[in-house]
């Protein structure tokens, strides 16, 4: 198949799949690129072929982000950078939100976060329900919202050490007090905005 160029507003259809199953939309300056499919998942061989033709045309395909494809929560956090906000409330309904690192995702779909004995930790003692919002880095508003229930806490030091923040010295880390690994069941995943399907599976 050869590339062709077709004007649509400021963008160009530069490739069309067999039976119009997918279309590649680009910008002549190679600053924008989309691969749009009619189905949720694109055939892997067709996708790879399309990428290779785009690379021949000097498009930087490394910046493409696959969306709409079913992906596990673990893969989502491994492939995205962004900011996490954890919200919790105590049994009286007093709410707090705080910045938290990306969670550790286990194979059974539960997640864990390292927490110190502060407001969030105290809230979870009297009310196990919480939410974690993750806002992806970059232009626009992309991300997810996880609705959580605390299932257990432990002090598994190996995992806590693995998840510790790099910029604290061991002394500073110790001075901040004990750390707990808080485990949560993920009840629902919603997109950052609205209520549509994220294409992300809990496990
Ligand atoms: C990038 C970033 C990541 C953070 N991650 C965590 C974390 O994983 N666990 C934690 O206990 N505090 C973390 N903090 C610190 C908390 O945001 C901060 O202590 C906050 O005040 C805690 O709020 P809380 O008292 O309501 O729990 C992080 C801070 C930043 C800037």
Image: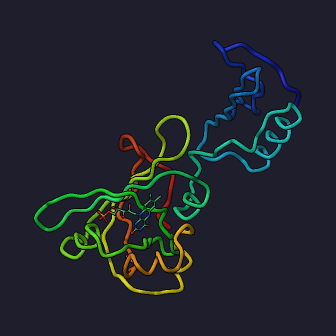
**Picture colour scheme:** rainbow
Q: Is residue 143 above or below residue 36?
A: below
Front residue of this view, candidates 15 and 97 = 97
Q: Position of residue 71 (x, y in %)?
A: 57, 57
Height in image: 181 above or below 186? below
Query: Who's the residue at 70% across and 42% down the image?
Result: 63
Q: Position of residue 180 (x, y in %)?
A: 38, 80
Left or right of 49? Residue 162 is left
Residue at the far left in the pictured view: 92
Residue placed at 54% from the left, 74% from the top? Answer: 169
In the displayed structure, would residue 114 be above or below residue 187?
below
On the rendered structure, is 80 left or right of 87? right
Number of marks in the rendered image: 0
What's the residue at 38%, 82% (across, down)? 178
- Where is residue 45? Give x, y as percent: 79, 49
Dividing the image into 4 quarters, which one contains the N terminus?
A: top right
Q: Residue at x 42, y 61 (%)?
A: 100
Ligand 1 is found in which quarter of the picture? Answer: bottom left
Q: Tell whether 181 sits left or right of 149.
A: right
Task: Using the rendered view, name the quadrant where residue 129 is placed.
Answer: bottom left
Image quadrant of residue 132?
bottom left
Q: Is residue 68 above or below residue 160?
A: above
Name the one closer to the observer, 47 or 28.
28
Residue 9 location (% of width, % of height): 63, 12
């Amino acid at each position: 198949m050869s590339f062709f160029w077709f004007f649509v507003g400021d963008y160009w259809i530069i490739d069309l799949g067999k039976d119009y199953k997918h279309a590649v939309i680009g910008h002549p300056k190679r600053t924008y690129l989309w691969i749009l499919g009619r189905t949720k998942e694109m055939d892997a061989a067709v996708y790879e072929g399309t990428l290779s033709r785009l690379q021949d045309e000097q498009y930087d395909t490394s910046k493409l982000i696959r969306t709409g494809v079913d992906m596990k929560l673990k893969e989502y956090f491994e492939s995205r950078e962004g900011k996490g906000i954890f919200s919790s409330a105590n049994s009286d309904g007093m709410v707090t939100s705080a910045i938290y690192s990306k969670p550790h995702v286990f194979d059974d779909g539960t997640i864990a976060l390292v927490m110190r004995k502060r407001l969030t930790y105290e809230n979870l003692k009297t009310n196990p329900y919480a939410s974690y919002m993750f806002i992806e880095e970059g232009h626009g508003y992309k991300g997810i919202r996880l609705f959580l229930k605390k299932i257990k806490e432990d002090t598994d030091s190996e995992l806590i050490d693995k998840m510790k923040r790099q910029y604290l010295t061991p002394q500073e880390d110790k001075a901040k007090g004990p750390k707990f690994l808080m485990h949560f069941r993920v009840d629902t995943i919603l997109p950052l905005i609205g209520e549509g399907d994220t294409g992300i599976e809990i496990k």
